[in-house]
Structures are given as structure tokens and as C-alpha cells.
Image (cartoon, coloured by chain):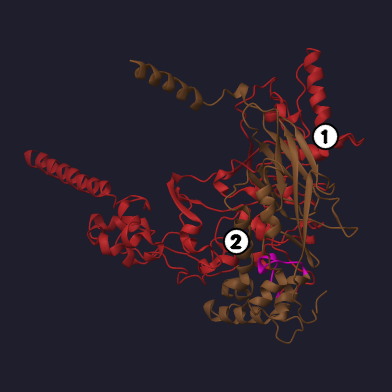
Amino acid sequence: MRHRLQLVLLIVTLVVAAGSSFRKASAEGTLGRIFSHNTKAHKTGKYSNCSACHSLPTRNWTSPRRDKLPPFPDVNTFPSHISCFGCHTKDIYSAGGAFCGTCHVVPTMRARAVLAFPIRSHQSQFTTLFPHSTHQDLIAEKRNDLDFSAAHFIPAVFVVPDEKPKAPIFYNCSICHQNLDQTPKYLPRKLTLFKPLSEPAPDTFTKPVTAEFFKDSPDGHESCFNCHYQFKNLPEDKKGCNACHELSPPYLEKKVIQRYSIKFDHQRPGHVEKDCTACHLRITQNKDVRAMKDADVPILSCKACHATQEDDEWKHILTTEVEKRDTSIANKQPAFQCTYCHTSAIGRYEIPPSHR
Amino acid sequence: MHISRTLKILMVLACFVSTPLPAALQSAPGSLEVNVKNVKIDGKPAKLSRKRFYLIPGGLTENAALLTRIKGAEITSKSCYYKGIQASDQYICWLQAENCESPFCRVVDGRYLDATDKLAVPEFIAAYNKGLPLYKGNTTISRQWVLTNMPDALVNGYYRQQQKVLGTVLAGLKPLQSSMTDSAGIRTIFLDIALPRTAEKSKYLVSNVLPIEIGDKSYVWTCEKDVEAGKKAVLDISKAGKNCEVTVRDLKVCATGPCGEK
């Protein structure tokens, strides 16, 4: 009985000691932790240069890609062992090689397969720098007829289908922003400055929300590399990863599109044939994409077509709905909810002065 | 004692001056629509699509020095820039075919890379061939990334030259905003124009600053317009009167050989 108690105590002591050792290593940022580009040792000295660890392209660039795009020279995997071993040799041989789990599927020294790169479940450690203004200066004056074709298909310049197309394909906003092929998760934006005037009402749609209501944004290097592979065609002081990537506090990228006007359909006749800058009025002067809070379509651009004196109902729908709201309030009836652009989540709130 | 009291007064004044005005005392921002759709050159409509205009505080009188610099700016036409860097006639023709200022304008498709095609452009073929070994013989990538293997002067040089001219003409003057006209050549709009302090209206200058090439001439529109707090002003630059000055200059155009396209 006494021996059994001693044995239990010994096991408990060993477990506690092992745990303590593991915690110590963890505290030093080497085990069971997500790799941080923000650690001082990872961003100073020779490591201030991204190419100290990352190669462009990685040797596996010809392998099939996770995003199903045709393979192209890219950073497709983690840096090689040599990048880590210089400082972390001790860590590799401790705690059964748990350190290896930073990049490998199995956290042991015998691990071979690496995790899918980049690890999408991890927080992003970089923000993207992109001057819309410069790119707007450089892209074409003309638009592609295909941008507003009946087929509702905007060609990704990265995948030009025909080597000898009959008509020229111009570089414009659709290089980076194309129609989605699957309806994304979407939500109405939250209004903080205004009060709701009535309870939510069931929403009606003249056309159900589909993928083509939305545009996407680049999520990788594919559209950028058309012109900037190996840091080409960039200003002298921006010939590196820092041209587009800047270290930031870790954050989770939002995968949900938030809109004020969920009923807005980019592909609807009347919208689709317009130049993007006709509504995204500030985009040609935006020098830093991070300064944009949202897609930034001022109501002024809607008013150009929807607050006119013309007879068609939709040509004056904005003023009509504002009048209906004002009348309902004047008659002490339940506040009229604006429905042409908005769902009830927005349409039941106070009307901003800008809409009048 | 006297000095101390003066200091106190100065400190109180300094606090007052540095404190921003309450929102209620500040004028609501205005906006300015610049209408370009009715512009005519030699009686024919001139489509000013995707042209950048700058918004500068003050009117023509206050910005007389800028106007002098606009009139005196040294400008090189697109064709002469590209001729000057020994671009091939085919390259210049490729740019001219769709009124492109640089190759960032449109996709280089297979017709221009096929040495047997009459439209073949030597610069594109050279860049394509340079790319092939880099991309493990992948012809699609070599074609689509052709701009990454071309000499800098051919790709970025003209834009850099334009930016240099812009810097010289502005000479340190910082425009409040800049905005481009839409591709239909109808308008551009300046939003959120903050008027000075409590002013109900204020005068602004709108100019494209960088000359726009049309035929063998260059054009700069410089117009003034009052913007009122909380309202949208409309400026039609085709109605050049005493509020608008159009600087027209002859432009040296460098001839190329016959172009096969268009």
C-alpha cells in the first residue's frame, strides 16, 4: 500500500515537472505557439528582410493549388528548415518535437507533411497596402464589353481564355474585383447613429439575393503578380514584400460581407453598364485601401438616377420613399419602412439627412 | 507681476485659438460636380474620360502663379516619349490603337507575340521569351506576366515623366483632393469639401494640371467655382467664360510608321 502511494506520488511529480518544462518552453515562444512575425528576433537583423526565410517562388509552385487556380510561381509553403534551425535547434529536440507542429501536420520530429499554407484558421499578421489612386491612373480609359455582357461573366485577367481574343481586353477594376460565383455570407451593416422607428418587418425581394450581387477582392497574389511578380514595376523604395504587406496586430479577417443596401445588384441593367467610379466616387483618390471603411458609395451617386424628376417610378424612388416616411410620421401612423434598397434591418431606422 | 499677467492672458488666448470650433459653428461640407460631357474641341465632342482633376483652394486670381506654371510647363507627347526611348514603331502603334499611355492599359494577347503576325511587337516577344525559362516553359504565364520582364522605361517611364511634370507645375502646392472623370466622360465629383471655418461659401479652383493630349495639341482646363456649405455646386467646364481658362498648346507629335491595327 505504501509502495503504491509512493509510485502514484512519483508519477504525479513527473507529470508536473514535464508540464512545467513544457510551459517554460511555451513562455519562451517556441512550443505550441503560432509563429509570430512580430517577435523581435523574427523581424530584426537579417530577418527584417522577408527573403531571409521566404522564397519567391517556392519550389512546390508547380503543384496543384488549394485555391484550384492554375499553378503559378508563388509562395506556396513554409520556409525551409534552415530558417528555423539556426535559433531553435534546442526546441526541436525538446518536448518530443512539439515545436515541429508550428508548420507540420504532426507535432513530432518524425513529421513530414506540412500544414496547408497559409494557415487560414490563424489570425492574419499583416495588413495590405494598396493605392487605388495610382492604379486608377494607370488602367485603361476604356471598358471591356464583357464587363456588362448578358452572360454576366467578367473574365479574370489572370485566366484569359483565348490567346488571340477578337477584341482587346482592357485592364480595369475587374482585374481584381469580379462577380462572385457563390453567394457569400452577408449581413446588414449596424446603424449606430440612428434610431429604429418601428419593429422589424418581413423582407420582400423583387429578385432573390444571388452571388452576382457581390464583387470579390484579391485574396492572394494572382492578380498582383500580373504586373508585380518579383517586385517589378514598383517604386524604388517598395521593391519587396513591404510594398503590399505591413505588420499589424493579429486580426481575424471578416468573411462576411456587410452592406447597407443588401438589395443592390451589381449586374442589374442600369447598374452593370456603369463605370465603377460612377458610384464608388472616392475610389480614384484613395491612396490607402486601409482608409476605406466599406465599399464607400455616397448616396449622391444613387441620387443621380433615383431622385430625379422623371416619370418612371424607380427614377424617383428615393424621394418617394422619403415622402412616404414623412407622411406616415405626420399622420401618426407606423413609420413607413424603406424597402427599395434596404431590408427592414436598415429601412426602419431614421432617414439620414444626406438622403433628403 | 505685469509680465505674469500678460503671460496668463497669452496662455488663455492660446488655448482659445487652439481649441477646435464646436461642430455647430463649423460650416457643413460642400460638394462640387465637374461636368465634362459637353466639351468640344474644334466643334467636335471631346471625350474626357478617366482624366484626373485637382481641387485647389482659392480662385484664378489667388492661383495666378499656378496658372503661369501651367502655361510654361514643358511637356513631351506620348509618341515623342516612346520615340525618345527607342521604342519600336509596333509598340507605339499598339499603344495608339486603344489610346493607351502605358502597357498597363490592356492585355497583351497572343497576336502581338506571334512573330509571323503583322501586329507582332518586338518588345513583347523579347519579354515573353525572357519569361519562358523563369516559369518552367509555361507559355500562359509568360504571356500574362509579360510586363514583369520588360525594361522599366517602356512600362513605367511615361507615367513617371507625367508625375514629374505634375510635381514641377504644382511646385509644392497641395491640392485638397483629386478625382477622375468616369469612363463615359461625363463627370467627376469632389465630396466633403471642408469650407474654411464659418464661411458659408468659398472659391475653389479645378484643374487637370497635367495637359491632356488631343490630336496635336494639349489642353489644361483651369476653372474657379464657388462652393456653398452643405450644397452641391456644378461646374461645366465646357462653358469657358471669365471663370475658366483653357490653356491650349501645340504639341510636338513624333511620327511612327504605318500602324496595322485601326
Q: Which residue is mark 2?
A: B164
Residue at the (19%, 43%) spot, across then down: A16
- Residue B142 locus on image (x, y percent): 60, 76
As drawn, is A125 to the left or to the right of A136? Answer: left
Say the numbered circle drawn on residue B204.
none
Which chain can be seen in red? A
As drawn, is A263 to the left or to the right of B172? Answer: right
User: SS at mark 2?
Assistant: helix
| Residue in the foreground of this view, choosing between B108 and A251 | B108
Look at the image and give the residue range highlighted in magenta. B98-109
As drawn, is A340 to the left or to the right of A239? Answer: right
Q: Colour of chain B?
A: brown
Residue A178 visible (yes or no): no
| Residue in the foreground of this view, choosing between B9 and B212 | B9
Residue at the (69%, 62%) spot, across then down: A171
- Chain identity of mark 1: A
The number of numbered discs placed on residues in the rendered structure image is: 2
Say the numbered circle drawn on residue A307.
1
